[in-house]
Amino acid sequence: MPAHDDAADAGRDWLEAELLDSLDEEAELEFEDAILSQEIARIYKDRHPDQIDRRVYFRELIKLQAELIRLQSWVQHHKEKAVVIFEGRDSAGKGGAIKRITQRLNPRVARVVALPAPSDREKSQWYFQRYVPHLPAGGEIVLFDRSWYNRAGVERVMGFATDAQVEQFFNDVPEFERMLVRSGIKVVKYWFSITDEEQQMRFLMRIHDPMKQWKLSPMDLQSRVRWEQYTKAKEDMFARTNIPEAPWYIVEGNDKKRARLNCIAHLLSLFPYEDVPHEEITLPERVFNPNYERATLPRELYVPERY
């Protein structure tokens, strides 16, 4: 067999191995039921009989992630700036969508911002001040896993902000976002929407799965009690902050996989990205120094090979 055929076969084997590794990586993210009770798993499956086929999901996800890489190159090349906001009820699937968007991107280009509760010092600042340092420079995409809209949601419902502060927020946020847009930042706002019953099921799954219990905070549990208050707050937020320069987009989230695919496809549709010039990459020749001898390192420096 000619040498070039051997090389081609080796290349195909390597690409196949890389694809399988990518699928394994996604499967790890999909690991939903480590110690999940079979009864809850059965109920969840019964309530989602029309879930998208797993093979279709993986195939479409990889296609979309390839397009995200093209978008990333375009953003870098043209020094574009983008802010993508992810909001929604607890357990609505924001984090899962963000993971799939950033999974194969350069973290120096596409970075995630998930701020903790404000400190006492931050509480005394202009409300938007702690978000400003995280805004993108040219060639960057910033994804906010919750954002300044905390004031319109959890802070308002839980009483962490006064009525006057909430009103001031609603007066300020449209102009704040218009300022961002005028400065050249693309502002995209997603709301992940799930039903009352779906949130209850997801909370039960987290309660019964030790690998996910950390996702449940006292605030999350209170969101179940105050479902209707959150609904009214959301409706008010849409009415007062859905501006032409930065409109809201609602992602139907009851089916997590469809929600991820729909969100990514929609995000890609908002940018006029195209292929950009790339320098051809060639692997340089390895330089060998005949006088170099590799030192033998002490065995204790190595991680034990338990697997």
Image: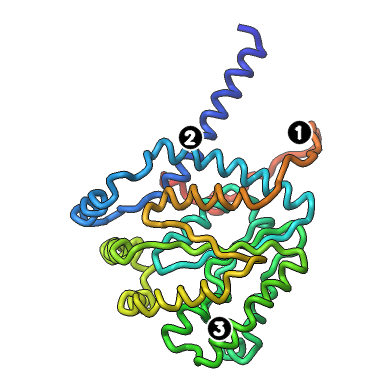
Q: Which residue lies at the image location 58% right of the left edge and 50% below the top edge?
A: 298
Residues at badges 3 and 2 in contact (C-beta under 8 Å)? no
Q: Check disc 1 and give the amino acid type.
A: Leu
Viewer-nearest residue: 194 or 8: 194
N-term mark: 3 or 2: 2
| Of marks 2 and 1, the one in the foreground | 2
Q: Check disc 3 and give the amino acid type.
A: Pro
Rendered image: mark on residue 77: none
Residue 246: x %, y % from top left:
63, 66
Could you tell whether 257 is left or right of 112 in the image? left
Q: Which residue lies at the image location 38% right of the left edge and 40% below the top edge?
A: 54
Q: Residue furthest left?
A: 39
CA distance for labels 3 and 2 = 42 Å
Q: Check disc 2 and give the amino acid type.
A: Leu
N-term mark: 2 or 1: 2
Viewer-nearest residue: 293 or 89: 89
Which SS class for mark 3? loop
Q: Which residue is mark 2?
A: 20
Q: Which residue is mark 3?
A: 118
Q: Which residue is mark 1?
A: 283
CA distance for labels 2 and 1 = 25 Å
Q: Can residue 198 be seen at all in this image of the molecule?
A: yes
Q: Residues within 10 Å of mark 1 (few under 14, many from 20)?
A: few
| Of marks 3 and 1, the one in the foreground | 3
CA distance for labels 3 and 1 = 48 Å
* Relative to 152, residue 14 above or below: above
Residue 3: x %, y % from top left:
66, 12
Residue 280: x %, y % from top left:
79, 34
Q: Which residue lies at the image location 66% right of the left edge and 87% below the top edge?
A: 126
Residues at badges 3 and 1 in contact (C-beta under 8 Å)? no
* Relative to 133, residue 273 above or below: above
